[in-house]
Image: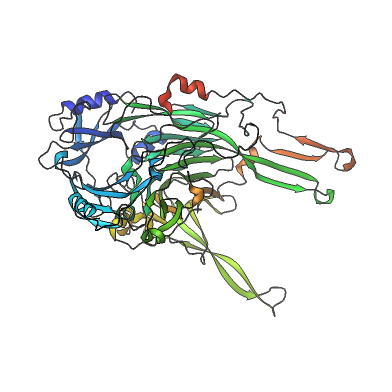
Amino acid sequence: MPGKSPQLRQFLENDPNIKADKSSNATLKSSYIFTAQLFEPKKEEVLKYLDEAGPKPKREAQVIMFRGDKEIPVVEEYVCGPLPEISKCELLQRPNRRNPVEWTVRLMWITALHNRPYKGLHSLDFAVLVNLKDVDSSKWETEKVFYSGQLFDSLDDLAAQYKNGSISKTKVKKPTYDEDIFSSLRRRGEPQPPKPQRPPRLVEPDGKRYSVKGKKVEYMGWSFHYRISPITGVSLYDVKFKGERIAYELKVADIATFYSGYAPYGQTLNNIENSRMIGSRSKALVAGAGCPETATMLKATFMNQYEEEPAVYDSALCLFEQNTGYPLRRHLSYKATDGGFFGGMLNSVLTLRSSISLPDSNYILDYTLGQNGAIEIKMISTGYIHTTFISPEEMPYGHRVQENIIGNLHQHHVLMKVDLDVNGRSNRYETLNISEEKLKLTAFPDRPYSQTKITSTLKKSEKEAVADYKMSEPKYHIVHNDKKRNKYNEKRSYRIDMKGMSKSIIEEDVGNERSISWVRHQMVVTKRKDEEETGSSIYAMLDSNKSVVKFNDYFEDNEPIVDEDLVFWISSGFQHIPHTEDIPNTAAVGNHIVVLLTPHNYYEECPSMASRDAIFIDYKDPKDPSKGVKVNRNGNSRDQCVVPKSTLEEYLEEKPDRILESRRRNPTDF
């Protein structure tokens, strides 16, 4: 909310019911602002404004307040507006979640680590369970201690047994600081290539083929608006191709990583990333390493608990066009008798990227738009793995990856929200089921034959539409408006193609699984409700005993979904058994989760046929092939271009905070 935060902060400080302390004076006993973001207006109001020249929806802020000042401390969420001149703040009321939320969901294992880069790969055999329920930090208590494979009731209990020799003592040599330490990301080993040679680079020989105005992007027939929430990260809105809206909203609703282990701090390490504010952790993309050097860096502004003024991140997102290196389409008819031509085009696409930098994992989120009308949402996992101090009991839960540590087995989960509006809001979801058909050959009736056929199934209710992947039952997932057909009377549709389906095998409603009940099915389809903004909440990491958001409630009421405004909740993921090649960092290769939205009978032919990127080669004289061939580049120049000089060093010299913290801003960040 650029420029709006000071007025909002002043109102919250002066409101007699909220009485927010200034961030410089705030303590756990204060009423203080945790974060704020734009409160999403109702979809109906937005579409009336966009499509029918209706009134502009009012802009409001959603504020999360930590109320340590109350007799029974709570967390409260408010809606404040209108922006920019605030006149009131009211508690956010939603039928499917409680507000306020209890303060007391605070238990945490704190582990000992050697302070070396990166410290997460230097686990030690010591951890304490700290009770953080009280707003008075002097009342925080150590409830349990874990050391040498044993659990102790207190530090005194451990100390007594340690002194009398009744436990096996763990001896670990402190690693010396060295630039070549195994956990460092500095280059080491035999240099490749032997002499410095720069890698391939992208160039834009005729300038950028996309434009950005405010938060609206246009490219090759595409247009969309983007927004970045401090909690859920970047989302796309009003995504149109050739003037027609394909999607109203695309977002990653949450990310979760569930670990396994013997030691209690590894066994119960279940990261649910909205709780760690994934949007506010997208703040330091690096041109030439995290994005192409041609990328446009986009800012994000966040209101947080640490500073009076909004925090501005200069490189929270990057936008770039890239050549993927493979053809979007091609065909060669080499022989004159086959037609004698070549036609094809390399696949160039536009990508909006954010990189979520968590203390351990890093996630790269790409929204990519193609010239064939396809949308790709891709999540890539990289970063450091979680490790546990080696012991015989830990061996079933991972591989030994260094002298004293194992990398723990874990499963990554991602929940995506896809609100499609295919030819309007009145949509149907059906599956095109591909099944075996046994029959007699038409030409030889005495010979049995087996082939596949298509049968269509319309999903009529939310429960009927729950999709669980079965390899033996392949199908297409199709979304369409039943009143819109192409000239061949086929339904103008978009297909949802899930490339990263992953089954969670942990038991339902046991432990922290309740907080991510969205992993139970690969896709859930619901009738859109504005209050069902996301499938999770910022409290999900610690609220499994009493979840603030119960995702299953979204479809348990089993509402009809025929000719309705539909939302598709897609759960994807993968299992990761860490190995030595994950040291020091997990490579992104293969760790991809992809959802594709592709046209299916929507256009009369592939929309990329209009692209000047294509090349067509045929004979100068079809009657006399010996006269040679001609190349049609559709008006594009063959001229060479000069590769621009990299400006990364100059960019950082001006403002080092763009990449690394050069002045202490957030002392309690972890």
Q: Based on the displayed image, in which of its 4 quarters is residue 323 positioned?
A: top right
The answer to whether residue 466 shows anywhere in this view is no
x and y percentages locating residue 463 in the rendered image: 36, 61
x and y percentages locating residue 105 in the rendered image: 21, 48
Q: Residue at x 58, y 66 (%)?
A: 453
Q: Residue at x 54, y 47 (%)?
A: 589
Q: Residue at x 72, y 33 (%)?
A: 633
x and y percentages locating residue 554 in the rendered image: 31, 54
The residue closer to the viewer here, 546 or 377, is 546
Q: Based on the displayed image, in which of its 4 quarters is residue 310 positioned?
A: top left
Q: Work out whether 132 lies above or below 635.
A: below
Image-based side of 368 in relation to 361, left or right: right
The residue closer to the viewer here, 561 or 643, is 643
The answer to whether residue 306 shows anywhere in this view is yes
Q: Which quadrant is home to the N terminus?
A: top left
Q: Which quadrant is home to the C terminus?
A: top left
Q: Residue at x 38, y 58 (%)?
A: 394
x and y percentages locating residue 624 in the rendered image: 89, 42
